[in-house]
Image (cartoon, helix red, strand yellow):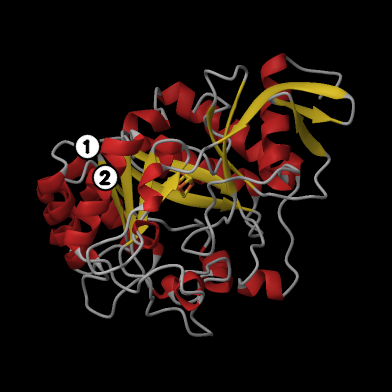
Amino acid sequence: MSTGTGPTVDVRITTRAELALRGVALDAPVRRPDGAGPSDDGHFLVGPGLVDGAGAALPRNPDSPYRVRDGKVWLGDEDTGLTLTPVQRPRFYDLTTADGIPYEHIARLHGADVLATTVVQTCVRYAEPDRCRFCTVEESLRAGATVAAKTPAQLAEVAEAAVRLDGVKQMVMTTGTTTGPDRGARNLVRCVRGVLEAVPGLPVQVQCEPPGDLAWIRALHDAGATAIGLHAESLDEEVRRRWTPGKATVPLAAYEAAWDEAVRVFGPNRVSTYLLVGLGEDPDELIAGAGELIARGVYPFVVPFRPMSGTLAARDGVEAPSTELLTHVTEGVAAKLRAAGMRGADQRAGCAACGACGVLSTAGG
Ligand code: SF4
């Protein structure tokens, strides 16, 4: 695709942003169905070349103007210069536990080499009016595609197989928020320990709300987690109250305290937060806020909001952000990351290290 102006790298970022929002007219053997977080995409490798493709989670959209022929992405008759290959179905999906649960219901492949699981698939905030408007964490449970709570033993069994059979290189463990003051961290500690007993050295990222007692952050680190995501989703309290009403009862000040403690315990650039583009936050305030996060050692993982089916936002007809907005925020945040020498890949585990749901890695962040 050509915009007519600007260096080639800008065109690549714009095209990658367009792909993230409009998707590709192609099915994918590996998908993220309903679940926590912002997307239900197909998993692909997108790159300047087929070999150096980076993971990309893209909507599968038969109406997308982007088509794939001969491993290349085309916009009409125009070669975008990007290559795209679907991630193949991993072998561990064919296995089941001794008690008959498909491994695929316990953890899933994200991108080419990330194993992802939601250890508790229910959330104390899922009932309206508390529920986050972009979230479908309990929908995959209702669809029978997962189990409500994964045991450390089940996770260990699946992780061992995924590493051995499919070359998985890192694991992401997220959780719905539980009722206790630890908000799910206590259970994550047990799950990390279980997995690392079976697969010593596997980089694992944990994701949870800031625990009420910050000592849980140390406990997660001591259990062996490599990185931690404490996801605010927005840095604007008014946007948080509208989009994440339940989570917004935990003020940003509590996130700041948790981020600082996590950087102290895990080290700089081992802590991250999602920031969703398209929730109505002022884009330049978002970029400036991301800069403050970078300065405190926290990686701001900028991701487009997508109106996934099953979400309250989709029900209400909210649309994804424009390519221009996503490109503007991505380039602004990537410039700050580059200036600070902070790269998502250096987190070693987690969404920032994977990068597939955003465009930052294409922009050099
Ligand atoms: S960025 Fe996170 S949610 Fe997205 S594909 Fe990678 S691991 Fe999965």
* Identity, as a three-letter code, of the amino acid under mark 1: Gly
Q: Position of residue 264 (x, y in %)?
A: 19, 43
Q: Position of residue 77 (x, y in %)?
A: 89, 25
Q: Position of residue 159 (x, y in %)?
A: 26, 47
Say whether residue 254 is left or right of residue 202: right
* Identity, as a three-letter code, of the amino acid under mark 2: Ala
- What residue is disc 2 on? 161
Residue at point 51%, 65% (across, down): 237
Q: Earlier in the sequence, mark 1 or mark 2?
A: 2
Does 218 sit above or below residue 187? above
Q: Which mark is residue 93?
A: none
Total residue callouts:
2
Foreground residue among 356 and 42:
42
Say whether residue 50 is left or right of residue 141: right
Q: Which mark is residue 267?
A: 1
Q: Position of residue 236 (x, y in %)?
A: 53, 60
Is the CB of mark 2 within 8 Å of ligand 1?
A: no
Residue 24, located in which quarter of the rendered image?
top right
Of the 4 image quadrants, the one containing the N terminus is top right
SS for dot 2 = helix
Residue at point 89%, 31% (across, down): 76
SS for dot 1 = loop
